[in-house]
Amino acid sequence: MSDRIDWWRIQFGEAEQAQMTAAVDQRCISQGPLTAQFEARMAEMLDVPHVVATTSGSMALYVSLLAHGIGPGDEVMMPNRAWIATAHAARLVGASVRLIDDEPDRPVMDLGDLLKKISPRTKAVMPVHLNGRAVDMPQLNRIAEEHGLVVIEDAAQALLSRNAAGYLGCQSAIGCFSMSLAKLMSTGQGGFMATRDEGLWQRLCSLRTHGVENVLQPVYTTGGFNFRFNDILASFALVQVDRLPARVKRLIEIYRRYETGLAGLDFLRLVPVDVASGEVPLYSEVSSERRDEVIRFLDGEGIQARPFYPTVKTARYLGCEDELPHSTRQCGRSFFLPCGPDQSDDNIQRVIETLRRFPGR
Ligand SMILES: *Cc1c(COP(=O)(O)O)cnc(C)c1O
């Protein structure tokens, strides 16, 4: 029996170790010059004026809402099919969560459903570009402008993913990115925000440091907290910035291998990502009515597959009552096959061959 195949594989090595040692040697361990350097590199890569690093993608979502003064009495709209972090960010600032269904044929937030649910309490919309798939940003921005809503993108799964207008996460007030383990770039924990708005940028920097950063006179100008990043992790991230284009290329390669290898299977299909338009398939996501059986079968063959997250609506404490049929159906069927920028061709091949032997297919 060959080695177990993990669902996600990303590799770190001597370059990261060397950079971290150098950071320690320079006594750069808290938020300092390396964090600033990382922010500048990321801003350049995404072609936005400002990037603000913080402790996690979840924190980025939370601080972005804080920066807009969203809180109790306000309602924040977001997709039902998403990672729970987006909903928890809204909840933590005291706002209520209104869930939006997916499009019938594409697992992204349905803007028709969103339009129907806008109320006088709605203050913000948080589109989630899950697995690199673009929510229709030009259309969403038009709706938001008409109804006076703030748009904050959850682009945690969409770093370097594009639509016709450019990079996702750079097409609204603030885009939020994550550097947790199963993301395109990883520092273990970490995240950052991208914004084109000078005022917002200053507010984010202030909020990150108890309201006293970028203030010329040492007075307390605004409430804030400690959401600072640190230079050790920034050094870890800086090594990876140059590798991102190669990682994107590799993820597309893996996606194509699955696309070819799984063609013709009737019990399972690859959930499409629009690679031709610039979307990056961070994960190799498949859909099957027999999901749990398939995952168990793969597990018995030494292959780890990971079911998609439960819908946000299943978090009962959020109190969401809407019927959300499309996202619910898709969530129940989706799972991730082994992927990640450092997953080998041999592993992908073994997964494909194993799936082609799935009993009763
Ligand atoms: C990973 C992720 C987050 C949260 O990022 P963390 O860095 O893990 O806090 C938020 N939203 C989505 C869609 C994610 O995949």
Image: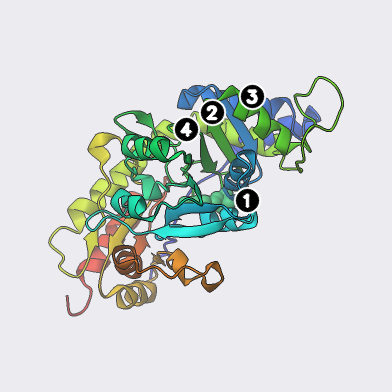
Q: Earlier in the sequence, mark 4 or mark 1?
A: 1
Of the two numbered discs 4 and 1 in the rendering, the one whose residue sits closer to the viewer = 1
Q: Which mark is residue 243?
A: 4
Residue 174, image x and y in percent?
52, 35
**Can residue 109 be seen in this snapshot?**
no
Left or right, 144 with reference to 69: left
Is residue 63 depicted above or below 267 in this figure?
A: above
| Amino acid type assigned to the residue bearing label 1 in the image | Gly
Q: Earlier in the sequence, mark 2 or mark 1?
A: 2
| Amino acid type assigned to the residue bearing label 3 in the image | Gln
Residue 117, image x and y in percent?
38, 55
Specify few, some or many for label 2: CA neighbours under 10 Å numbering under 14, 14-19, or 20 or more. many
Of the two numbered discs 4 and 2 in the rendering, the one whose residue sits closer to the viewer = 2
Q: CA distance from mark 1 to mark 3?
A: 33 Å
Q: Which mark is residue 37?
A: 3
| Amino acid type assigned to the residue bearing label 4 in the image | Arg
Q: Which mark is residue 71?
A: 1
Residue 224, image x and y in percent?
75, 41
Q: Earlier in the sequence, mark 3 or mark 4?
A: 3
